Amino acid sequence: MSRALLAALAACALLLGCAQPGSIAPGTPAAEVVQSLGRPSARYPLADGGERLQYSSQPAGQTVHNVDLDAAGRVVRAEQALSEALYGQRIRVNEWTRADALREYGPPARTMGVHNFDGTIWIWRYLDGPTWRLLFIDIDRAGVVRGWSNGDENLPDPPEPR
């Protein structure tokens, strides 16, 4: 590998290391967030007149960072939404709609149907320590969240060294 390419890769790594959604301080203006993190993957209005900037690495990654802004456009909270500690506090079975799931977690990594549920299961990938996990949210045909669960992601074994 050439020295120029190595230098460019090192510079990219340094820049990416500085721009972490979880390191955004409360009170930071929205323009500064976007300058630091780039354009969000989605934007959602919040009930208090603020806005959520969402930075999702789905479908291949395991993170969805939400940066919540107040009505004045300043950061109130920045967090990794895909956290087992938060699911039970956030997901409201029989109350949430498809729109609520999108606002909290963004588009799922994938969806699937199962024979014993009349709707679609939305699936997000996330990490719990070193373990690759999945969040499943059951959304019925009317667009209402009817349940949620989580489980391990089945990954193929790495190839044997030659």
Image (cartoon, rainbow, N blue to C red):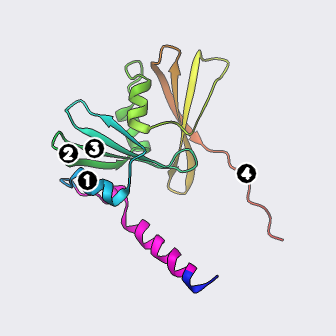
From the viewer's perspective, tell me whether residue 13 is left or right of residue 2: left
| Distance of label 4 from label 1 (alpha carbons) | 42 Å
From the viewer's perspective, tell me whether residue 115 is left or right of residue 10: right
Earlier residue among tags 3 and 4: 3
> Is 129 located above or below residue 9 in the figure?
above
Residue at the image point whose x is 73% and y is 51% from the top: 156
Residue at the image point whose x is 45% and y is 75% from the top: 11
Type of amino acid under label 2: Gly
- Does dot 2 land on a helix, a strand or a loop? loop
Earlier residue among tags 4 and 1: 1
| Distance of label 1 from label 2 (alpha carbons) | 8 Å
Residue tagged 1: 31
Residue tagged 2: 73
| Distance of label 2 from label 3 (alpha carbons) | 9 Å
Q: Residue furthest front?
A: 4
- Report the span colored magenta: 5-25
Sort mark 2 into few (<14), some (14-19) or many (20+) by Cα contacts within 10 Å. some
Residue tagged 4: 156
